[in-house]
Image (cartoon, rainbow, N blue to C red):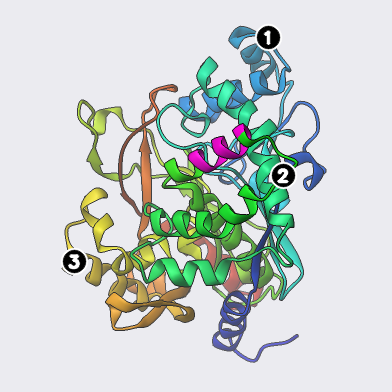
Amino acid sequence: MAYQTIDEANKAVVQKMIGSAPFLTDVVPAHTVIPELTEHVLLHAGPPIKYENMTDPMQGSCVGAILFEGWADDEQGARELLENGKITFIPCHHVNAVGPMGGITSMNMPVVVVVNKEHGNEAYCTLNEGIGAVLRFGSYSDQVLTRLHWMKDVLGPVLSKALKTMDEGLNVNVLVAKAIAMGDEFHQRNIAASLAFLKEVAPAITSLEDVELEKREEVMQFLADTDQFFLNVAMATAKAMTDAARTIEHGTIVTAMCRNGENFGIRIAGMGDEWFTAPVNTPQGLYFTGYSAEDANTDIGDSAITETIGVGGMAMIAAPAVTRFVGSGGFNDALETSNNMAEITEQENPNFIIPTWDFKGAPTGIDARKVVESGILPVINTGIAHKVAGFGQIGAGTVNPPIECFEKAITAYAEKLGFNA
């Protein structure tokens, strides 16, 4: 379809996001829905990157994934595979997926399946591991590997069975609408959504007579303990929404934001699959006791896909409780942040109403033109990883994309339209 103006195209792109109908339908081994995931293939967060350019936490995640899959017997064997080019890397975004922090995903890891029933596309994300020493932050101890195998053998299959007892799966828009009214912003704060998810699946899990009681109890306890469980569902949901919008292939609305520790990358609707990158920043925020900015890794992860649909840092006012956690002040600072984000977005999302923002909808559809014109950069809520693999999360904060990403995207789109011919 031809659009007369960029504004018209942008409205169509955002309407396709807002008109999405994401449903969580299943949890399955990654290779069953991502055919590219075969032996010796790993997905990673962010735009394309070579192994030697990955930061230590992402490299540590690669080691952990190889040990989890049994492609090597120990760390030395895993690193030999990695350093000798025996592992193929693919960005999660290239295969309808997203991954938190390191984003490392291997063939037998369980992933959530979110189906956009309005537009017919799917998106995938690994399950949240909880907090502490976890693969996404680069840990690969025996404890981490044991948990990953439990997630593969118990958590994933039990959730799959529970979801299949529901006629359509779980309507994610409904869960988000509930949780945003309860103080979640879906990047750093997901406790309300995680509990709402548990409320929906608990009856189904307890009714699974073909699953041992011990396993059902383990799953219920894990979900009750994991405040951030819904983050990964939100990420897959955002990916399903933005991928549907990307099919329009016109306009300047941002359809992906992600980082790999080396570069920050964005996509815009009018430039399809092309990445526009610039050196990534390091988050600014608060550190856990004993850590400081000197310990921080540069920003990593695909979780900024949440901001791409208007939540996370974009909807800071929805979660004033999170502002102190990420070091961004108090209520008035959260209000100022979301008001600024409204300046660079196309419209409010009527599905995600924010009571603390006078019942406005979440600011949705970042317009790269407005970012360049105003100099206002999207605000991304994020965890801060230690720069050495194995330490895990050492704080939380906010980060901004480099403005160069948006400048490059607008310049390329102008050339595509013939403005500089």
Which segment is the magenta one? 214-222
Q: Nearer the viewer, residue 35 or 192?
A: 192
Q: Secondary structure at mark 1?
A: loop
**Rendered image quadrant of residue 419:** bottom right
The stretch drawn in magenta includes residue 173: no
**Of callouts 1 and 3, which one flags the residue occurring earlier in the amino acid sequence?**
1
Q: Residues within 10 Å of mark 2 (few under 14, many from 20)?
A: few
Q: Do the residues under discs 1 and 2 have CB atoms within 8 angstroms?
A: no
**115 sits left or right of 141 in the view:** right
> How far is the residue under mark 1 from the one under mark 2?
37 Å
Q: Do the residues under discs 1 and 3 have CB atoms within 8 angstroms?
A: no
Query: Measured from the top left, where is residue 267 in percent x and y?
Result: 58, 61
Instruction: Identify the residue at image location x=17%, y=61%.
Output: 330
* Amino acid carrying mark 2 in the image: Glu
* Amino acid carrying mark 3 in the image: Phe
The N terminus lies in quadrant: bottom right
The vertical placement of 21 against 212, above or below, is below
Q: State the predominant SS element of the stretch in magenta.
A: helix
Q: Residues within 10 Å of mark 1 (few under 14, many from 20)?
A: few
Q: Secondary structure at mark 3?
A: helix
The vertical placement of 315 against 51, above or below, is below
Query: Measured from the top left, where is residue 186 in percent x and y?
Result: 43, 58
Q: Residue furthest bottom?
A: 4
Query: Measured from the top left, where is residue 352 in percent x and y?
Result: 45, 75
* Residue located beneath label 3 in the image: 331
Task: Point out which mark residue 73 bears.
Answer: 1
Instruction: Identify the residue at image location x=44%, y=47%.
Output: 228
Instruction: Identify the residue at image location x=57%, y=44%.
Output: 99
* Residue located beneath label 2 in the image: 209
